[in-house]
Amino acid sequence: MNNLYSKNSEIVPRKQIGGVELGLSIHDLKLEADTIKEVNEQKMVLILDGSIFILLVDNRVFQVSALAGYQGKLLNKHYIGESISNFIDSDSWEFSDADDGFINKECAGVVIRCDLEDASIEEIRENQSELYVAEISVFE
């Protein structure tokens, strides 16, 4: 599996993170069965030392998330560990309560979440100097 995936590759909205492409079947991922966890009929797996999270729905990759330890960038710019203040009052990014993170107005299929879970935009604004990007997820 280590040869198939990389924690350094570009994050591509609506397509892939680390070589894990959206829409791939569980069999195409070539994962060891004991790495796959099932919760509420959804399957999930962490790979590359927990730096990539894969959510499977109907045995297909539905969402891929870059987490701590992932080195690749989104749009050659944004990365795990970046200050969340770069997204507040941005022309390109807006906070979405439904997605619990920042979505790009010009580029669908990606959400950026900070390290303060279930936070409102007001809480994020208040604590922005201390918050960072903890997750970048791609989906269709």
Image (spheres, rainbow, N blue to C red):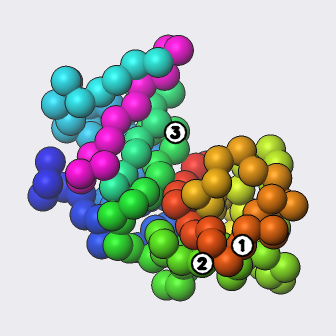
Residue 28 screen position, x and y as percent? 26, 38
Q: Identify the mark nearer the N-term, 3 or 2.
A: 3
Residue 62 is marked as: 3
Q: Quadrant of residue 89?
A: bottom right
Residue 50 screen position, x and y as percent? 31, 49
Give above or below for 6 relative to 21. Answer: below
Q: Identify the mark nearer the N-term, 3 or 1.
A: 3
Residue drawn where x is 80% and y is 44% of the image: 98
**Gap between marks 3 and 1, in whole Å?**
30 Å
Amino acid beneath label 2: Ser
- Confirm whether the magenta stretch covers residue 37: no
- Out of 122 and 22, give the one closest to the viewer: 122
Task: Give the foreground label among 1 and 2.
Answer: 1
Numbered disc 1: secondary structure? helix
Numbered disc 2: secondary structure? loop
Q: Which residue is mark 2?
A: 83
**Gap between marks 3 and 2, in whole Å?**
27 Å
**Gap between marks 1 and 2, in whole Å?**
8 Å
- Out of 66 and 119, give the one closest to the viewer: 119
Q: Which residue is mark 1?
A: 128
Residue drawn where x is 12% and y is 58% of the image: 3
Callout 1–callout 2 Cβ contact below 8 Å: yes
